[in-house]
Amino acid sequence: MELTLWTPPSRRAFPFDKPLKLIPLGDLHAGCDGFDGDRLHRMVKKAVADDCWFYGMGVYTDFASASNREKLIVAGLYETSRSLVDGAVDRVLDELKQILEPTRGRWLGMLEGNHYWMFEDGVTSDQALARYLGAPFHGTCGVTHVLFQEPPRRSATAVLWATHGRGGASTKGTILRKLAAAITSWDATVYMMGHLHQLESAKVDRGYTTHSRSPVLIAKPLLLVGTGSYLKGYQQGSRYGGRPRGSYVERAMYPMTSLGSPLVTLTAKEDRIRGHKYIYVDPGVSY
Protein backbone atom coordinates (compact mmCIF):
# COMPACT_ATOMS: atom_id res chain seq x y z
CA MET A 1 0.00 0.00 0.00
CA GLU A 2 1.21 3.48 -0.89
CA LEU A 3 0.09 6.64 0.95
CA THR A 4 0.65 9.92 -0.89
CA LEU A 5 -0.29 13.58 -0.73
CA TRP A 6 -1.10 14.76 -4.24
CA THR A 7 -0.58 18.38 -5.20
CA PRO A 8 -1.24 19.86 -8.64
CA PRO A 9 1.77 21.15 -10.61
CA SER A 10 3.15 24.48 -9.36
CA ARG A 11 0.66 24.62 -6.45
CA ARG A 12 0.67 23.44 -2.82
CA ALA A 13 -3.04 22.57 -2.93
CA PHE A 14 -6.04 22.47 -5.25
CA PRO A 15 -8.20 25.64 -5.35
CA PHE A 16 -10.97 25.57 -2.73
CA ASP A 17 -13.88 26.69 -4.91
CA LYS A 18 -12.95 24.70 -8.03
CA PRO A 19 -14.20 21.10 -8.44
CA LEU A 20 -11.51 18.53 -9.08
CA LYS A 21 -12.61 16.33 -12.00
CA LEU A 22 -11.10 12.85 -11.75
CA ILE A 23 -11.37 9.87 -14.10
CA PRO A 24 -10.43 6.47 -12.62
CA LEU A 25 -9.19 4.55 -15.65
CA GLY A 26 -8.48 0.85 -15.82
CA ASP A 27 -9.30 -2.60 -17.18
CA LEU A 28 -8.39 -1.44 -20.67
CA HIS A 29 -7.09 -4.84 -21.86
CA ALA A 30 -5.05 -3.31 -24.68
CA GLY A 31 -3.76 -5.97 -27.05
CA CYS A 32 -6.93 -8.05 -26.70
CA ASP A 33 -9.31 -8.44 -29.65
CA GLY A 34 -12.10 -6.85 -27.59
CA PHE A 35 -10.14 -3.73 -26.57
CA ASP A 36 -12.21 -0.64 -27.50
CA GLY A 37 -9.35 1.72 -28.39
CA ASP A 38 -11.63 4.11 -30.28
CA ARG A 39 -13.80 4.66 -27.20
CA LEU A 40 -10.70 5.24 -25.07
CA HIS A 41 -9.29 7.71 -27.59
CA ARG A 42 -12.54 9.72 -27.62
CA MET A 43 -12.72 9.75 -23.82
CA VAL A 44 -9.11 10.95 -23.46
CA LYS A 45 -9.61 13.76 -25.95
CA LYS A 46 -12.76 15.02 -24.19
CA ALA A 47 -11.34 14.58 -20.68
CA VAL A 48 -8.17 16.55 -21.38
CA ALA A 49 -10.21 19.33 -22.97
CA ASP A 50 -12.37 19.40 -19.80
CA ASP A 51 -9.28 19.71 -17.54
CA CYS A 52 -9.73 16.29 -15.97
CA TRP A 53 -7.15 14.34 -13.95
CA PHE A 54 -6.67 10.58 -13.93
CA TYR A 55 -6.07 7.64 -11.60
CA GLY A 56 -4.95 4.26 -12.97
CA MET A 57 -6.90 1.23 -11.74
CA GLY A 58 -4.78 -1.55 -13.27
CA VAL A 59 -4.95 -3.95 -16.25
CA TYR A 60 -3.76 -1.60 -18.95
CA THR A 61 -2.64 -4.45 -21.24
CA ASP A 62 -4.18 -7.89 -21.52
CA PHE A 63 -0.86 -9.77 -21.23
CA ALA A 64 -0.39 -11.66 -18.95
CA SER A 65 -2.50 -13.09 -16.10
CA ALA A 66 -0.87 -14.40 -12.94
CA SER A 67 -1.29 -18.03 -14.00
CA ASN A 68 0.18 -17.29 -17.46
CA ARG A 69 3.19 -15.55 -15.90
CA GLU A 70 3.86 -18.50 -13.60
CA LYS A 71 3.74 -20.97 -16.52
CA LEU A 72 6.12 -18.88 -18.61
CA ILE A 73 8.56 -18.56 -15.72
CA VAL A 74 8.50 -22.32 -15.11
CA ALA A 75 9.00 -22.90 -18.84
CA GLY A 76 12.45 -21.28 -18.59
CA LEU A 77 12.35 -19.44 -21.92
CA TYR A 78 15.58 -18.97 -23.85
CA GLU A 79 16.88 -15.39 -24.08
CA THR A 80 15.76 -15.13 -27.71
CA SER A 81 12.24 -16.30 -26.83
CA ARG A 82 12.12 -13.93 -23.86
CA SER A 83 13.19 -11.04 -26.11
CA LEU A 84 10.41 -11.87 -28.58
CA VAL A 85 7.81 -11.77 -25.78
CA ASP A 86 9.28 -8.51 -24.41
CA GLY A 87 9.10 -6.98 -27.90
CA ALA A 88 5.47 -8.01 -28.38
CA VAL A 89 4.46 -6.44 -25.05
CA ASP A 90 6.44 -3.30 -25.94
CA ARG A 91 4.47 -2.94 -29.17
CA VAL A 92 1.16 -3.15 -27.30
CA LEU A 93 2.44 -0.58 -24.79
CA ASP A 94 3.54 1.75 -27.60
CA GLU A 95 0.05 1.67 -29.12
CA LEU A 96 -1.49 2.41 -25.73
CA LYS A 97 1.01 5.22 -25.07
CA GLN A 98 -0.07 6.92 -28.30
CA ILE A 99 -3.68 7.02 -27.08
CA LEU A 100 -2.77 8.16 -23.54
CA GLU A 101 -0.01 10.63 -24.54
CA PRO A 102 -2.26 13.72 -24.01
CA THR A 103 -2.72 12.67 -20.35
CA ARG A 104 0.98 12.78 -19.42
CA GLY A 105 1.58 14.64 -16.16
CA ARG A 106 -2.13 14.50 -15.23
CA TRP A 107 -2.12 11.36 -13.06
CA LEU A 108 -2.62 11.21 -9.29
CA GLY A 109 -1.36 7.63 -9.26
CA MET A 110 -1.50 4.24 -10.95
CA LEU A 111 -2.23 0.81 -9.48
CA GLU A 112 -0.95 -2.59 -10.53
CA GLY A 113 -3.55 -4.97 -11.94
CA ASN A 114 -3.59 -8.75 -12.26
CA HIS A 115 -2.56 -8.61 -15.95
CA TYR A 116 0.98 -7.37 -16.59
CA TRP A 117 4.32 -8.56 -17.91
CA MET A 118 7.69 -8.35 -16.16
CA PHE A 119 10.47 -7.43 -18.57
CA GLU A 120 13.92 -8.96 -18.35
CA ASP A 121 15.23 -5.96 -16.38
CA GLY A 122 12.61 -6.53 -13.65
CA VAL A 123 10.37 -3.60 -14.59
CA THR A 124 6.72 -4.51 -15.18
CA SER A 125 4.60 -3.23 -18.06
CA ASP A 126 2.46 -1.34 -15.51
CA GLN A 127 5.54 0.41 -14.10
CA ALA A 128 6.80 1.24 -17.59
CA LEU A 129 3.47 2.85 -18.48
CA ALA A 130 3.39 4.80 -15.20
CA ARG A 131 6.88 6.16 -15.86
CA TYR A 132 5.91 7.28 -19.35
CA LEU A 133 2.78 9.04 -18.09
CA GLY A 134 4.56 10.64 -15.11
CA ALA A 135 2.28 8.84 -12.65
CA PRO A 136 3.25 7.81 -9.10
CA PHE A 137 3.13 4.01 -9.00
CA HIS A 138 1.00 2.83 -6.07
CA GLY A 139 1.26 -0.93 -6.50
CA THR A 140 -1.55 -3.04 -5.05
CA CYS A 141 -3.51 -0.41 -3.12
CA GLY A 142 -3.27 3.36 -2.92
CA VAL A 143 -4.50 6.00 -0.46
CA THR A 144 -4.19 9.52 -1.89
CA HIS A 145 -4.84 12.76 0.00
CA VAL A 146 -5.95 15.77 -2.03
CA LEU A 147 -5.76 19.09 -0.21
CA PHE A 148 -8.16 21.90 -1.13
CA GLN A 149 -7.12 25.28 0.21
CA GLU A 150 -8.04 28.95 0.14
CA PRO A 151 -5.49 30.98 2.11
CA PRO A 152 -5.33 31.91 4.84
CA ARG A 153 -7.84 29.67 6.64
CA ARG A 154 -10.18 27.54 4.53
CA SER A 155 -8.93 24.05 3.75
CA ALA A 156 -10.36 20.55 3.29
CA THR A 157 -8.91 17.15 2.43
CA ALA A 158 -10.35 14.44 0.21
CA VAL A 159 -9.05 10.90 0.73
CA LEU A 160 -9.10 8.50 -2.23
CA TRP A 161 -8.89 4.78 -1.43
CA ALA A 162 -8.24 2.63 -4.48
CA THR A 163 -7.63 -1.04 -5.21
CA HIS A 164 -7.67 -3.01 -8.44
CA GLY A 165 -9.77 -5.70 -6.78
CA ARG A 166 -10.21 -9.43 -7.27
CA GLY A 167 -12.81 -12.17 -7.58
CA GLY A 168 -15.63 -12.67 -10.05
CA ALA A 169 -19.10 -11.20 -10.47
CA SER A 170 -22.08 -12.89 -12.11
CA THR A 171 -24.60 -10.33 -10.86
CA LYS A 172 -24.89 -6.56 -10.75
CA GLY A 173 -23.97 -4.83 -7.51
CA THR A 174 -21.14 -7.17 -6.55
CA ILE A 175 -18.54 -4.42 -6.73
CA LEU A 176 -20.58 -2.15 -4.46
CA ARG A 177 -20.90 -4.92 -1.87
CA LYS A 178 -17.13 -5.40 -1.90
CA LEU A 179 -16.55 -1.66 -1.51
CA ALA A 180 -19.11 -1.46 1.29
CA ALA A 181 -16.89 -3.86 3.22
CA ALA A 182 -13.92 -1.51 2.75
CA ILE A 183 -15.81 1.25 4.57
CA THR A 184 -15.51 -0.71 7.80
CA SER A 185 -11.69 -0.63 7.63
CA TRP A 186 -10.78 2.61 5.89
CA ASP A 187 -11.86 6.21 6.40
CA ALA A 188 -11.96 7.84 2.98
CA THR A 189 -14.02 10.15 0.80
CA VAL A 190 -14.05 7.99 -2.34
CA TYR A 191 -13.60 4.21 -2.55
CA MET A 192 -12.65 2.92 -6.02
CA MET A 193 -12.34 -0.61 -7.39
CA GLY A 194 -11.90 -2.12 -10.84
CA HIS A 195 -11.39 -5.73 -11.98
CA LEU A 196 -15.09 -6.67 -12.20
CA HIS A 197 -15.71 -4.30 -15.15
CA GLN A 198 -18.81 -2.91 -13.46
CA LEU A 199 -19.61 0.76 -14.01
CA GLU A 200 -21.63 1.40 -10.85
CA SER A 201 -21.68 3.83 -7.94
CA ALA A 202 -23.43 4.60 -4.66
CA LYS A 203 -23.32 7.64 -2.41
CA VAL A 204 -23.74 7.08 1.33
CA ASP A 205 -23.35 9.12 4.50
CA ARG A 206 -21.33 8.36 7.62
CA GLY A 207 -22.25 10.06 10.90
CA TYR A 208 -19.81 12.07 13.02
CA THR A 209 -20.17 14.32 16.05
CA THR A 210 -18.24 17.47 16.85
CA HIS A 211 -15.91 17.63 19.87
CA SER A 212 -17.55 20.43 21.80
CA ARG A 213 -19.63 21.09 24.89
CA SER A 214 -22.75 20.90 22.73
CA PRO A 215 -22.02 18.09 20.23
CA VAL A 216 -23.46 18.46 16.75
CA LEU A 217 -24.23 15.59 14.37
CA ILE A 218 -22.48 15.84 11.00
CA ALA A 219 -23.17 13.56 8.03
CA LYS A 220 -20.07 13.05 5.88
CA PRO A 221 -20.79 12.01 2.27
CA LEU A 222 -18.86 9.01 0.89
CA LEU A 223 -18.76 7.65 -2.65
CA LEU A 224 -18.33 4.02 -3.78
CA VAL A 225 -17.27 3.64 -7.42
CA GLY A 226 -16.87 0.68 -9.75
CA THR A 227 -14.51 2.02 -12.38
CA GLY A 228 -15.63 0.24 -15.56
CA SER A 229 -13.72 -1.27 -18.47
CA TYR A 230 -12.84 -0.94 -22.16
CA LEU A 231 -13.12 -4.64 -23.02
CA LYS A 232 -16.00 -5.79 -25.21
CA GLY A 233 -17.15 -9.03 -23.61
CA TYR A 234 -19.51 -10.00 -26.43
CA GLN A 235 -18.67 -9.48 -30.10
CA GLN A 236 -20.44 -10.74 -33.18
CA GLY A 237 -18.17 -12.95 -35.25
CA SER A 238 -15.46 -13.23 -32.58
CA ARG A 239 -12.81 -15.88 -33.27
CA TYR A 240 -10.06 -17.49 -31.21
CA GLY A 241 -7.68 -20.12 -32.54
CA GLY A 242 -9.09 -19.70 -36.05
CA ARG A 243 -12.60 -20.80 -35.10
CA PRO A 244 -15.77 -19.09 -33.88
CA ARG A 245 -15.37 -18.64 -30.17
CA GLY A 246 -16.37 -16.00 -27.66
CA SER A 247 -14.20 -14.22 -25.09
CA TYR A 248 -13.82 -15.46 -21.51
CA VAL A 249 -16.71 -13.11 -20.62
CA GLU A 250 -18.99 -14.85 -23.09
CA ARG A 251 -17.83 -18.35 -22.14
CA ALA A 252 -18.41 -17.68 -18.42
CA MET A 253 -21.83 -16.11 -19.12
CA TYR A 254 -20.88 -12.92 -17.29
CA PRO A 255 -23.44 -10.13 -17.71
CA MET A 256 -22.88 -7.37 -20.24
CA THR A 257 -21.41 -4.22 -18.73
CA SER A 258 -21.45 -0.62 -19.94
CA LEU A 259 -18.03 0.35 -21.28
CA GLY A 260 -16.20 3.53 -20.34
CA SER A 261 -15.12 5.39 -17.22
CA PRO A 262 -16.94 7.33 -14.50
CA LEU A 263 -16.27 11.02 -13.94
CA VAL A 264 -15.73 11.65 -10.22
CA THR A 265 -16.01 15.24 -8.98
CA LEU A 266 -14.61 16.46 -5.66
CA THR A 267 -15.88 19.82 -4.45
CA ALA A 268 -14.76 21.54 -1.25
CA LYS A 269 -17.70 23.13 0.56
CA GLU A 270 -18.42 25.15 3.69
CA ASP A 271 -21.66 24.80 5.63
CA ARG A 272 -23.08 25.68 9.04
CA ILE A 273 -24.90 23.18 11.25
CA ARG A 274 -26.45 24.52 14.45
CA GLY A 275 -24.01 27.40 14.42
CA HIS A 276 -20.93 25.22 13.81
CA LYS A 277 -18.86 25.83 10.69
CA TYR A 278 -18.41 22.59 8.77
CA ILE A 279 -15.88 22.30 5.92
CA TYR A 280 -15.86 19.09 3.89
CA VAL A 281 -15.37 17.62 0.40
CA ASP A 282 -18.54 16.55 -1.40
CA PRO A 283 -17.95 13.70 -3.91
CA GLY A 284 -20.13 13.18 -6.98
CA VAL A 285 -20.14 10.97 -10.04
CA SER A 286 -21.50 11.04 -13.58
CA TYR A 287 -21.12 8.96 -16.75
Image (tube, rainbow, N blue to C red):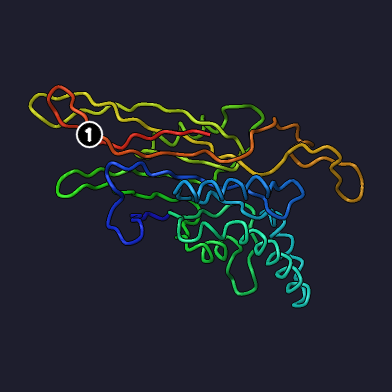
Q: Which residue is mark 1?
A: 270
Residue 240, horizontal then vertical, whole percent: 85, 48
How many residues crowd mark 1 within 10 Å: few (<14), some (14–19), many (20+)? some
Q: From the viewer's side, name the closer residue of 31 and 270.
A: 270
Q: From the viewer's side, name the closer residue of 123 and 45.
A: 45
Residue 28, horizontal then vertical, whole percent: 63, 49
> Would you say 160 lies left or right of 111 here?
left
Q: From the viewer's side, name the closer residue of 222 and 68.
A: 222
Residue 268, horizontal then vertical, whole percent: 29, 39
* Residue at 39%, 26% in the rendered image: 204
Residue at the limit of the structure toward the left, as seen here: 213
> Would you say 13 lies left or right of 172 here?
left
* Residue at 84%, 42% in the rendered image: 238
> Would you say 213 lies left or right of 237 here?
left
Q: Where is 200 relative to 6, above or below?
A: above
> Would you say 58 lies left or right of 137 here?
right
Residue at the limit of the structure toward the bottom, as seen here: 79
Residue 38, horizontal then vertical, whole percent: 68, 48
* Residue at 61%, 51% in the rendered image: 59
Q: Where is 122 relative to 1, above or below?
A: below
Name the amino acid, label 1. Answer: Glu
Residue at the limit of the structure toward the right, as seen here: 243
Q: Secondary structure at mark 1?
A: strand
* Residue at 55%, 43% in the rendered image: 165
Q: How many marks?
A: 1
